[in-house]
Image: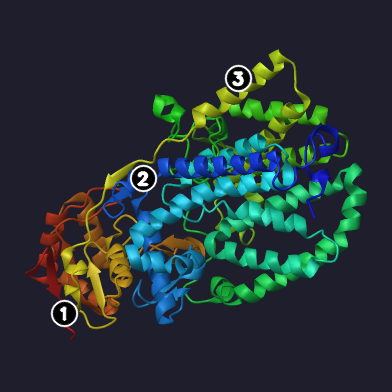
């Protein structure tokens, strides 16, 4: 059963388009060629964006976010290890010894880890990370193209324009800087498809079950995106249903819709019961997030700015309005904003009264999420104006308090993509006069060409030391024992998790590490924080790693170091010749001097310095 025609903006098929061609006809072959063209373009664009990593997947890292890359590589390796060894995929004791880490409140990407486990074991976590990232980008564009071409528009060109825009929108390219969760945008059109199917009479059980499974999959990959999608669906559907011309249709569909939604909720709850328990009641949980929502709020001017990794950006038209390069969540540019408004006006003027409900719902959804993305206070060109916004109230609510408001702007990109697709279909169906056709073509070109993505910036990454890759570490660490690199593993110094990921993916066995890059308890007011609350020794060594300045080490420092190492149950301390710093160069020589002053002279083992820690 096709999605109701009242959900489609623009002329009805009967008004403007020929019927769909039968299988085997010329039109059908033309559609298949369009599908193949969409596939090729999406894959090539995805490879182009990630091409810097394809040069050497194991030896290169994303320049602006090598820490998240290391985290997702670790999650892929740990998930594969958990699958093959029967351990808990949602809680691990391999990080943050002795407390462990609740992965259910982190971004565990469990489904990806399980599905790609064979590839992780075959080619290693870095290459698997790159494959998933590339597939995410291509699949997002193709999923939106599929939803548009099969359910929302008749013209494949319209579907292609909308799908490619959403798949490679500024926010998607920005999050391609190592975010395997947010680049999994292919889940969103599938969710929308299944939500709209809930209205089918007589199939509410089947449709509810399918939606429930899809919700569980999405939760395990991108829980925050699932939350935003649910909010957007709710806003869109309520706005659409309250339109006078749609009330009768909405009222008639409501009972079946609610029954299917109930089945979906029950199915998702059963599948997610354990991770949800861990998320809200389990050990090492936290409330809120480890990030400041005032910082991670979208600047109003960011909507009209150009993204860094675009043609406009590399031409020098980018800005520094995002909190960091991975969070350019709007950045549509002024031309596209003007074009989007023109699309709304055109579609509103040309649509039948019933179809205007769709246009109105899209405009309301985009506008509301844009305002919510501005966070609790207005921010213009980096300056905060003390004017409270709706998010000031919403941000105090459960679940909202764990989200970053600026990411709500990501909802606007699919809305714009839908408007672009509907407009292309409208123009193709009504054949405007030549001046108007030229004007719209130029408008699309001026708005979209500056946003064409360029490849992500990458940098050479320090190799995993031979001490780890050879398996020599097993001679110094008992099975499941604790090894710590210097400096201790954090988001800015992620080598420990890279080493651990290598050992797990190459079936060398387990070693645990203190600290780690994760979100856990310990932040102000019971909120989360990145990594554990620092102890004296790791705080001292982190400062030395960043500054290169070795303080005078006292007997009290040595006693604290011994106590900390006993607390962490560390068996050996390891310093590699080359250490990766995600935000600063690590001063290895200064670290060795400080560690020697704390722990005594090290041993030289292959390409690392090693300190054995007495067990008593």
Q: Position of residue 543 (x, y in %)?
A: 24, 56
Q: Residue 379: which quarter of the image?
A: top right
Q: Which residue is most to the right?
A: 248
Q: Which residue is most to the bottom?
A: 616
Residue drawn at x 82%, y 40% as measured from the top left = 357
- Asked if residue 248 is positioned above or below residue 263 in the image, the reply reads above
Please indicate whether residue 223 sits to the left or right of residue 327 in the image: right
Work out how far the residue at label 3 is from the one at label 1, CA to CA, in angstroms. 67 Å
**Residue marked by disc 3:** 442
Q: Quadrant of the C terminus?
A: bottom left
Q: Secondary structure at mark 3?
A: helix
Please indicate whether residue 348 sits to the left or right of residue 497 in the image: right
Question: Which numbered disc, 3 or 2, marks the residue that appears first in the sequence?
Answer: 2
- Asked if residue 479 is positioned above or below residue 245 in the image, the reply reads below
Residue contact at pointers 1 and 2, CB within 8 angstroms = no
Q: Secondary structure at mark 2?
A: loop
Which mark's residue is nearer the viewer, 3 or 2?
3
**Residue marked by disc 2:** 64
Q: Quadrant of the N terminus?
A: bottom right
**Residue marked by disc 1:** 475
């Amino acid at each position: 059963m096709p999605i109701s025609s009242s959900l489609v903006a623009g002329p009805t098929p009967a008004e403007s388009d020929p019927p769909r061609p039968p299988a085997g006809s010329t039109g059908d072959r033309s559609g298949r060629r369009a599908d193949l063209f969409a596939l090729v373009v999406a894959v090539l664009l995805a490879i182009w964006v990630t091409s810097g990593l394809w040069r050497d997947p194991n030896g290169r890292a994303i320049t602006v976010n090598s820490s998240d890359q290391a985290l997702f590589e670790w999650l892929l390796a740990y998930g594969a290890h958990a699958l093959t060894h029967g351990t808990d995929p949602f809680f691990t004791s391999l990080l943050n010894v002795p407390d462990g880490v609740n992965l259910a409140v982190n971004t565990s990407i469990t489904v990806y880890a399980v599905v790609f486990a064979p590839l992780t074991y075959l080619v290693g976590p870095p290459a698997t990370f790159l494959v998933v990232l590339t597939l995410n980008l291509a699949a997002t564009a193709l999923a939106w193209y599929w939803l548009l071409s099969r359910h929302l528009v008749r013209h494949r060109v319209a579907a292609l324009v909308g799908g490619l825009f959403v798949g490679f929108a500024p926010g998607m390219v920005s999050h391609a800087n190592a975010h395997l969760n947010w680049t999994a945008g292919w889940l969103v059109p599938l969710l929308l498809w299944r939500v709209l199917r809930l209205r089918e009479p007589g199939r509410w059980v089947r449709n509810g079950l399918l939606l429930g499974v899809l919700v569980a999959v999405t939760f395990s990959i991108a829980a925050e995106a699932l939350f935003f999608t649910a909010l957007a669906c709710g806003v869109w559907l309520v706005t659409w249903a309250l339109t006078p011309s749609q009330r009768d249709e909405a009222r008639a569909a409501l009972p079946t819709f609610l029954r299917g939604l109930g089945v979906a909720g029950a199915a998702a709850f059963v599948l997610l019961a354990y991770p949800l328990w861990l998320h809200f009641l389990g050990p090492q949980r936290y409330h809120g997030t480890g990030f400041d929502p005032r910082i991670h709020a979208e600047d109003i001017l960011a909507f009209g700015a150009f993204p860094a990794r675009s043609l406009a950006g590399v031409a020098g038209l980018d800005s520094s309005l995002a909190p960091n390069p991975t969070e350019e969540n709007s950045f549509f540019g002024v031309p596209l904003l003007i074009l989007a408004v023109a699309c709304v006006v055109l579609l509103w003027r040309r649509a039948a009264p019933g179809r205007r409900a769709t246009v109105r719902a899209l405009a309301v959804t985009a506008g509301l999420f844009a305002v919510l993305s501005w966070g609790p206070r207005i921010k213009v060109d980096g300056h905060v104006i003390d004017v409270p916004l709706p998010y000031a109230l919403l941000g105090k609510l459960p679940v909202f308090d764990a989200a970053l408001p600026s990411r709500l702007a990501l909802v606007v990109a699919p809305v714009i993509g839908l408007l672009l697709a509907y407009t292309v279909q409208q123009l193709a169906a009504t054949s405007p006069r030549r001046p108007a056709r030229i004007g719209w073509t130029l408008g699309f070109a001026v708005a979209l060409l500056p946003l064409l993505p360029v490849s992500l910036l990458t940098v050479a990454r320090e190799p995993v030391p031979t001490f780890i890759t050879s398996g020599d570490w097993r001679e110094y660490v008992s099975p499941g024992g604790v090894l710590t690199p210097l400096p201790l593993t954090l988001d800015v110094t992620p080598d420990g998790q890279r080493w651990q990921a290598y050992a797990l993916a190459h079936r060398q066995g387990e070693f645990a590490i203190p600290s780690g890059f994760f979100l856990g308890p310990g932040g102000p007011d019971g909120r989360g924080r990145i990594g554990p609350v620092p102890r004296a020794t790791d705080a001292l060594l982190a400062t030395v790693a960043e500054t290169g300045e070795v303080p005078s080490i006292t007997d009290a420092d040595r006693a604290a170091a011994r106590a900390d190492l006993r607390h962490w149950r560390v068996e050996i301390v390891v310093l590699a010749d080359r250490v990766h710093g995600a935000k600063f160069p690590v001063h290895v020589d200064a670290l060795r001097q400080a560690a020697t002053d704390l722990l005594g002279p090290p041993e030289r083992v292959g390409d690392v310095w090693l300190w054995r820690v007495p067990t008593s």
